[in-house]
Amino acid sequence: MFYRRGILFVLAALALALTGQGTSAADKPIEIVFSTYMPTSYGYLVQPLIDFMAEVEQKSNGRVTFKFFHSGQLYKARRIPP
């Protein structure tokens, strides 16, 4: 009885793997919320952040994306968690 269940489980897992029905965490897109209190007019501070986000998106083939909040849109300077 236990032997039969084990075989059925292995066959079901193999069928999912071969048909591509199973999804892994590596297949799911990742969205990162990025917040800064600095306005975009501070180009020398904000532009490196934008470049970093663009490079991560490019190197991950679009799997990692960012939601960018600047100028205290999400948090004010004193409320940003450490």
Image: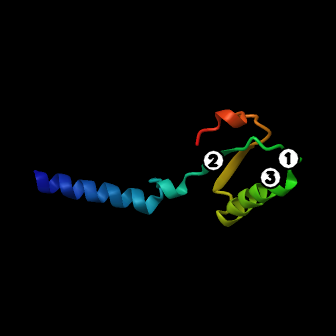
Image x and y of residue 53, in percent = 72, 56
Amino acid found under the numbered disc labelled 2: Glu
Secondary structure of the residue carrying numbered label 3? helix
Q: Quadrant of the C terminus?
A: top right
Do the numbered discs 3 and 2 sit on residues whose CB atoms are within 8 Å?
A: no
**Figure check: 58 above or below 72:** below
**Figure check: 37 above or below 50:** above
Identify the disc placed on residue 40. Answer: 1
Query: Mark 2 — residue?
Result: 31
| Residue at x 68% of width, y 34% of height | 78
Direction from residue 7 to residue 64 in the image, left or right: right
Label 2 vs label 1: CA separation? 21 Å
Q: Earlier in the sequence, mark 3 or mark 2?
A: 2
| Residue at x 27% of width, y 59% of height | 10
Secondary structure of the residue carrying numbered label 2? strand
How many other residues sit within 10 Å of disc 3, few (<14), some (14-19) or many (≥20)?
some
**Figure check: 70 above or below 22:** above
How many other residues sit within 10 Å of disc 1, few (<14), some (14-19) or many (≥20)?
some
Amino acid found under the numbered disc labelled 3: Val
| Residue at x 12% of width, y 52% of height | 2
Identify the disc placed on residue 69. Answer: none
Secondary structure of the residue carrying numbered label 1? loop
Do the numbered discs 3 and 1 sit on residues whose CB atoms are within 8 Å?
A: yes
Amino acid found under the numbered disc labelled 1: Thr
Label 3 vs label 2: CA separation? 19 Å
Direction from residue 11 to residue 61 in the image, left or right: right
| Residue at x 70% of width, y 59% of height | 57
